[in-house]
Structures are given as structure tokens and as C-alpha cells.
Amino acid sequence: MEVAVNEVFFSNIQEEGTVMDYVDGAFVFVLKDEMWTEHEIKAVRQKPLQVDFVFKYDIPIFLLTIEDAIDTSDFIFNVHDGEYPENLYEVSEHGCKGIIYLLDKQNIVCGKRVFIMSKALSSCIVDSLIKQKNSSYYEEEFNCNLDGLQSTWEPFELQEFALESEIIK
């Protein structure tokens, strides 16, 4: 379910920060802030996007950076959080689709970018998600590991652990 710029986002995001999910065959990355500048909105559409994928302690982490506009943001994914379709665990002939949304405090879409990740990055992501799906899962352990990761490293510091990275122009 894609949402156009200037429309209300399909899910009511309460707090500022980052949220991600897998919806209708796409990884959806949401950045919510009180407001976005014209520079940031334009950059999300036009500037190079760096995508780094980290898989540490069985936690998939997507790191997104938009050149000269939006600092590295981390997006945590957990296949155990919901029921996902089988196509989540498959790489399409073109690679995985991603959509970035910039939301303001009223959950209005201020900026949006649709992109396709390379087959190499997509394969790395899918392989890691399969590994996470097949591993034993304890919510308390997952949250403890996540807290440890986020208290030890800033998102940009996690880039050195990336299994795969690419810049999308």
C-alpha cells in the first residue's frame, strides 16, 4: 500500500524516529520528525542513497544514509514480529524493493523515494532473514541484544559491520 506525498500515512506512527516493515512486497522505511526542510525532502528524492545491511546477534539492521541531508538512520527488522508472506524470503529478478517515507508530526508524507536494491544486497538480506527465521527466538534475548547494540554503537558506527553495502543514485 503506497502513499503519495501530502497524504496521511496508512499507519498511525506515534513517536518520532525510525520504523520499518515489509508491506505489499516492499521494505518500508519510515522516518518521522516534527518537520522536514525543503533540502531534506528534495534530497530524499534526488541525492545518492547509501544502504548498508548489518546482521549482528541474529538482528537484521538496515542503515540508510542520504548524502548531505539525512544522517545514517538504523532500521531494525524482526521476522518473528509478524506474519510475512513467503515472497519475503525470495529475491525477485530485479532485487528487493524499498520505499522511504518522511513523515511529519501529523503523519503526513512529506517526502518519498522508491528504490530497488541490487541482487547482491537483496540476496544478502534474504539469506539473513532466512537465518533469523530458522533460529530459535526469545523476545527478551532479542531485546537485550538490540539494547546492547544500540547502546554500544551509533548507527554510523555500525556501517563497519555491514555484510553488504551499495549506493543507489
Image (cartoon, helix red, strand yellow):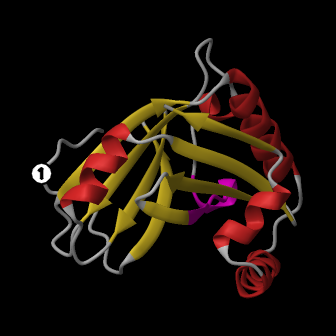
Q: Could you say where residue 85 lies in the image, as x and y percent from the top left?
A: 57, 36
Q: Choose between 91 and 48: the one closer to the eye.
A: 48
Three-letter residue code for mark 1? Glu
42 relative position to 154: left or right: left
Q: How many marks?
A: 1
**Would you identify the image quadrant in which residue 137 lies?**
bottom right
Q: Is residue 81 magenta?
A: yes
Depth check, front residue: 131 or 71 = 71
* Left or right, 41 with reference to 133: left
Q: Compared with residue 19, is residue 67 higher up or lower down, i.e. above or below?
A: above
Q: Is residue 164 visible?
A: yes
Boundaries of the magenta span: 73-82
Residue sitting at 69 percent across and 31 percent down?
Answer: 122
Q: Looking at the rendering, which quadrant does residue 3 occupy?
A: top left
Question: At 49% from the left edge and 57% from the top edge, which residue is drawn?
Answer: 20
Whether residue 9 is visible, yes or no, is no
Secondary structure at numbered mark 1: loop
**Image quarter of the N terminus:** top left
> Residue 147's x, y, as percent?
72, 85
Q: Nearer the viewer, residue 70 or 22?
A: 70
Point 67% across, 67% down: residue: 156
Q: Residue furthest left?
A: 6
Q: Which residue is mark 1?
A: 7
Q: Position of residue 9 (x, y in %)?
A: 22, 56
Q: Is residue 93 within the magenta segment?
A: no
**Relative to 152, 43 lies left or right:** left
- Determine the residue located farthest toward the top in the rendered image: 93
Looking at the picture, does residue 143 appear above or below residue 120?
A: below
| Position of residue 65 measured from the top left corner of the image (x, y, whole percent) | 54, 55
Disc 1 crowd, CA 10 A, few/some/many (<14, 14-19, 20+)? few
